[in-house]
Amino acid sequence: MLFACFSNQNSVVAQKKVIRDTVRYNVNRTWLYSLVLPGAGQFRNKQYWKIPVVYASAGTFAYLGYSSNKNYHTAFDNYKYATDADQKSVFKSEYSKYRTQRDLFFAGVGAVYLFSQLDAVLNVHSEKHSPAKATIYSVLVPGLGQVYNRKYWKVPIVYAAAAGLAYGIQFNNKEYIRFKTAWENVENKVPDEFNGARSAEELKHYMSNYRRNRDLLVMLSGVAYALNIVDAAVDAHLYDYSVDDNLAIRLEPIITDTPGFGKSMYSYSNAGVGARLQITF
């Protein structure tokens, strides 16, 4: 004898889905606002005091970068028109210093812009683990989605892959420029670093190989970046996946005892052994 028992939890599942969809909508909308206008996400989160901090920081970095850029051009012009070797050395040191400062300050503007997005998404209220947050974190900072998912062991893998790809791109690009310069020198019949030991065809062959390797590694970097995002999104969707008895198929033995008909001493009951199939969903 087989009894089938169905426990329907559709209402609970539907309620959880509504909550998750609402959180995802709020997270995506907040990130979009911050992406278009820094500080808009903080306004949406009603953290108004952070808005002047964002703009004051970005404005300070932008002003310092602009000033360093002016000083860089002035020092570079002095270096270009200087005739004395000592002066040229001094001006070269100056314009190199101002160029580095300019790049760092402008990078600071980008860091503030990035931080404003991360802060806006982070402060969207959500009691449940949010796949939208994990995805956006990995879009903005590779590996951060894995941290949010508490898959910390994946972070070194992400950055080891990134470091290896970056080194490969830098190395192949350097060698490409090296052989390209030598090839152009041979073509223009001027001395090259190999002193004529390599022909123009050979130099062009190496140049093409390094360029192809560089471009391939750039494409692989894009693939690795996309995989980092996909991995964070998948882990976040499975973060709250339940494997307990609330989602299960159970088959268990039972003893049945169905009363018989009649009220005399000869009354009987239909007792037996059966099985019960319980599907909980």
Image (spheres, helix red, strand yellow):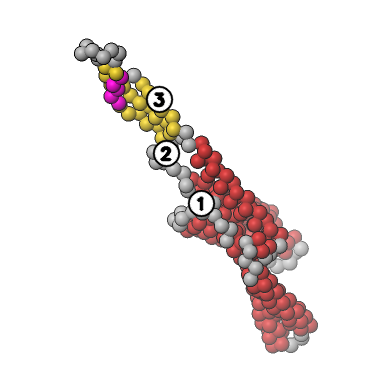
x%, y% of residue 67?
73, 79
Which residue range is magenta in the image? 254-258
Q: Secondary structure at mark 3?
A: strand
The number of numbered discs placed on residues in the rendered structure image is 3
Q: Which residue is label 2 attached to?
A: 246
Which SS type dominates the magenta stretch?
A: strand
Q: Which mark is residue 4?
A: 3
Distance from label 3 to label 2 (Cα)?
16 Å
Of pointers 3 and 2, the one earlier in the residue sequence: 3
Q: Quadrant of the N terminus?
A: top left
Q: Horizontal and vertical percent for residue 90?
A: 68, 86
Q: Which residue is mark 1?
A: 128
Earlier along the polypeptide chain: callout 1 or callout 3? 3
Residue farthest to the left, as pictured? 265
- Marks 1/3: CA–CA distance: 33 Å
Q: Could you tell me if residue 18 is visible in this image?
A: yes
Q: Residue at x 47, y 58 (%)?
A: 156
From what the image shows, is residue 39 above or below residue 256? below
| Disc 2 crowd, CA 10 A, few/some/many (<14, 14-19, 20+) | few
- Binning the other alpha carbons within 10 Å of mark 1 as few (below 14), some (14 to 19) or many (20 upward) gives few
Measured as percent of width and height from the top left, residue 121 is found at 60, 59
User: Position of 160 compared to 45: left or right?
Assistant: left
The disc labelled 1 sits on which kind of residue?
Lys
Which element type, helix, strand or loop, lies under badge 1?
loop
In front: 34, or 123?
Answer: 123
Q: In the image, residue 191 lies at what x, y percent?
A: 70, 67
| Residue 255 counted in the magenta span | yes
Instruction: Tell me the kind of residue under disc 3.
Output: Ala
Mark closer to the chain start, 2 or 1:
1
Along the viewing direction, whichever of 124 and 205 lies nearer the viewer: 124
Q: Is residue 19 left or right of residue 211?
A: left
Q: Quadrant of residue 138?
A: bottom right
